[in-house]
Each structure stands twice: as structure tokens, then as C-alpha cells.
Image (cartoon, rainbow, N blue to C red):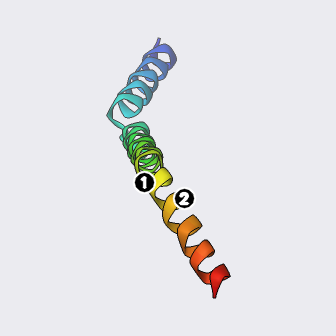
Amino acid sequence: MSRINSTLQQLVVTIRTMFTSEKGATATEYSLLVGLIALVIVAGVTLFGTNLNTFFSSLGATVGGW
């Protein structure tokens, strides 16, 4: 009976450790940050991509004309 009791206590300690560990929460937070940064980069490239393409095309034409 004592062996079953100690095994159950060890199981309870293991389960408590799993639920109080914050390693998974930290990984989730970092993955959300990476996703948001990627979204901002995609939005920035979408918004400014056409303007930058026009700018560098006109710059290339100006330099080519020299």
C-alpha cells in the first residue's frame, strides 16, 4: 500500500510541475511575436513596394541617361 501511495504522490507532483511550467507559454509568446513581425514586414513591402519600384526605375533611367 505504501508503494502505491508514493507512486500516486509522485504522479501528483509530476502533473503539478507540468501545469506550472511556463516553457510552453514563453514559446507561444515568441511565436506570436514572430508572426506579428512577419505580418508587419509583408504589409510594409506591399504598401511601399510599388513606390520603391517606381523610384528605382526612374533612378536607373536617370543614371543610364548620363
Residue 24 sits in quarter: top left
Work out whether mark 1 precedes mark 2 in sequence or the reverse, and give the earlier one. Answer: 1
Residue topped by disc 2 = 53
Which of 19/38 is in front?
38
Q: Callout 1: 10 Å neighbours few (<14), some, many (20+)?
A: few
Which of 14/5 is in front?
14
Residue furthest front in the image:
65
Q: Is residue 65 above or below residue 13?
A: below
* Residue type pointed to by label 1: Phe
Q: Secondary structure at mark 2?
A: helix
Residue topped by disc 1 = 48
Work out which quarter of the rendered image holds the C terminus and state it.
Answer: bottom right
Residue furthest top in the image:
1
Q: At x 49% / y 53%, what residue is drawn? A: 49
Q: At x 38% / y 34%, what residue is drawn? A: 17
In the rendered image, residue 21, in percent from the top left (x then y), is placed at 37, 38
Q: At x 42% / y 31%, what residue is drawn? A: 18
* Residue type pointed to by label 2: Asn
Q: At x 45% / y 47%, what residue is drawn? A: 34
